[in-house]
Amino acid sequence: MPNIHLFSFNLFEVHTMVVWKEGPSCVIIDPGFYTENERNEFYNFLNDKGLTPEAILLTHGHMDHTWGVKDVQDRYGVPVYMNSLDAELARTNASYADIYGLKAPDFSFSYTGVEDGMTIRAA
């Protein structure tokens, strides 16, 4: 049975999840931390549990789900998996962030497109 830790991040209260069976490998789902405090809470949890991300999975490309992706990928060098159809959606994040007066997520991360029926094995 996997372990799941749930965070609620940013003003949209996105659910960021850390999933692992046995350490140290884990998977991060929707790393949406926005503030420095949220970022620290996220990394402190990983450090306290001795976990190292092996992959990032995105449920979709909205800004609230992607604010922390580039940071996690840069820190750990992990692959990101996202439905290919969300790439266009993610490119519009800057416009939506501007409407809310928020910083746009850094969408310069690399990702592998995921299609229906595909299996991803990690952690």
Image (spheres, helix red, strand yellow):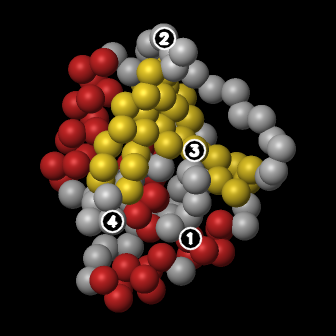
Q: Are marks 2 and 4 in contact (CB under 8 Å)?
A: no
- The residue that label 1 is drawn on is 90
Q: Secondary structure under badge 1?
A: helix
Q: Give whichever of discs 3 and 1 has the lower sequence position.
A: 3
Q: Give whichever of discs 2 and 1 has the lower sequence position.
A: 2
- The residue that label 4 is drawn on is 12
**Kind of residue at badge 3:** Leu
Residue at figure coordinates x 64%, y 47% from the top left: 81
The location of residue 80, given as percent across then percent down, is: 59, 46
**Kind of residue at badge 4:** Phe
Residue 74 seen by the camera: no
Q: Is residue 5 left or right of residue 55?
A: left
> Local crowd at mark 1 within 10 Å, few (<14), some, or many (≥20)?
some
Q: Are marks 2 and 3 in contact (CB under 8 Å)?
A: no
Q: CA distance from mark 4 to mark 1?
A: 16 Å
> Local crowd at mark 4 within 10 Å, few (<14), some, or many (≥20)?
few
- The residue that label 3 is drawn on is 57
- The residue that label 2 is drawn on is 22
For marks 2 and 1, give the one nearer the viewer.
2
Q: CA distance from mark 2 to mark 1?
A: 32 Å
> Local crowd at mark 2 within 10 Å, few (<14), some, or many (≥20)?
few
**Kind of residue at badge 1:** Ala
Q: Nearer the viewer, residue 94 or 61?
A: 61
Residue 44 seen by the camera: yes
Image quarter hosting the C terminus: top right
> Local crowd at mark 3 within 10 Å, few (<14), some, or many (≥20)?
many
